[in-house]
Amino acid sequence: MKIMHCSDVHLGKRPVGPIGVYSQKRYDDYFRAFEQCIDTGIKENIDVLLIAGDLFDRGYITPEVLERTESILQKCLANNIQVLLIEGNHDNIARDKEPESWIIYLENKKYISRPFCSFDGDGYHFHPVTLDGINFYGAGYPGDMVNETMKALAEQLPPLPSKNIVMVHTAVSGSDFYHGTVEKETVQLFKDKVIYMAGGHWHSYQYFPQEHPYFFIPGSLEFWDLNEPADKKGCIIFDTESRIHTFVPSHPRKKIELTLEAESASPDTVLQEFKNYVNTIDIARDEDIVLAEIRIASTFYVDAALCEELLLDKGALKAVVKVSSPGREKSEWALHPAMGVEKAEEELISTWEVFCGMASQTYAVLQKLKMHQREGNRQLFLECLDGMLEMLMKKEENAGEN
């Protein structure tokens, strides 16, 4: 059996702000990327498509989003491709009060099948989908209960040579904070019980363990955040007979990243230096996204908004310019509040005793909290905040033990 695994498709996502050319193109990008993924699967003669969570960007979607999704999934029906889908944190149906959610609708319309788990007084119950002798188990998005849920599943799975595939919207925990991730020790419980584990949640290609991996994350198909890397997004094709997996990169919208080490010592000359630099860059009009950083050695103000206008005039679909001055001393913060606010935040956090040794992780979480607040993602904001508090509590517990 030939399987394609994708995740974090985020259909229906729009950038923050008014609806215009950029907003519409980015909205369309997610549908385009998903359709290209399925077209690739058709060319590769896949039998099954696994979507490991976050097919949609929100739990509640518009009729247009649903209609466009059905149109793409119709290609799978027409080519006898079975689609298995689990919910992610963005589209987690466990939060919905109404039983007739979009995922149930797609299941009732025969577009997808849904392996899932349930919980009652007797514990966890897993309801797999079996295709050609392969059992597909789904754990959805367990959130804070991910390790408990996955341990329960590992206990119930029959060992090899039984052919089991697990779908779960999580990633393996690393040194950086990320809410809803599973511990390595928990994943290792599946070593002799699965032929493949289809993960998600992270937006870059990952696998575990490094040698003889069986847990995979394909990465999102498009940029959910413009700061995400472009070279680790796509889908994975897995052959259940040969046990060979192949990463297939997707083609997100082109993102150009620029860095200018400014040699000038005044705002006007830096602007002219940046303008000259921009004139040397090839930008596809109304297509390319440009992220630029201007590094200056002194503490004077550079108009980032004006620099962004220069890039838009050059043809950029979207331009984001950041000005940084790595040589600035802490004593200069109060004198130059407009300079490098984000850098100042990180440096300030590092001086707080309770965050000692965790400044970079805390800073990253705070940036996510601000992003979720701006974009109105209440559930993601609360999940991120819960994870931050959990991180601090664990730090205090470890400090107490020492």
Image (spheres, rainbow, N blue to C red):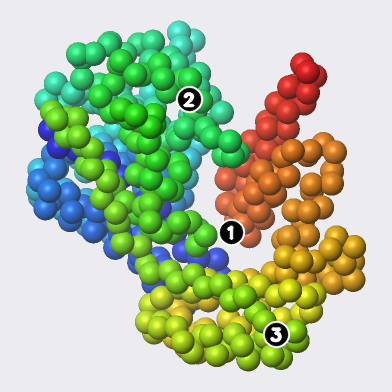
Q: Secondary structure at mark 3?
A: loop
Report whether 397 appears left or right of 133: right
Which marked residue is nearer to the observer: mark 1 or mark 2?
A: 2
Please name the residue that numbered disc 1 is placed on: 375
Q: Secondary structure at mark 1?
A: helix
Going from N to C along the chain, the mark reached first, 1 or 2, is 2
336 versus 208 height, above or below: below
Q: Tag 3: residue type?
A: Ser
Which corner quadrant holds the N terminus? Answer: top left
Please identify the residue farthest to the front as the structure is shown.
Answer: 263
Q: Nearer the viewer, residue 63 or 70?
A: 70
Using a 10 Å C-alpha cutoff, classify the residue at mark 3 as few (fewer than 14 neighbours), some (14 to 19) or many (20 or more): some
- Count the marks: how many? 3
Q: Secondary structure at mark 2?
A: helix
Percent x, y of residue 58: 46, 50
322 versus 209 height, above or below: below
Instruction: Name which quarter of the figure residue 347 lies in.
Output: bottom right
Instruction: Name which quarter of the figure residue 144 lies in.
Output: top right
Going from N to C along the chain, the mark reached first, 3 or 1, is 3
Percent x, y of residue 171: 45, 35
Report whether 59 appears left or right of 84: right
Which marked residue is nearer to the observer: mark 3 or mark 1?
A: 3
**Gap in Å between the C-alphas at discs 1 and 2?**
32 Å
Q: Nearer the viewer, residue 2 or 18?
A: 2
The residue that appears at 59% across and 76% down in the rendered structure is: 260
Q: Tag 2: residue type?
A: Lys
Which marked residue is nearer to the observer: mark 2 or mark 3?
A: 3
Q: Check whether the beta carbons of the residues at disc 1 and disc 2 lie within 8 A of each other.
A: no
Please name the residue that numbered disc 3 is placed on: 264
Percent x, y of residue 45: 10, 46
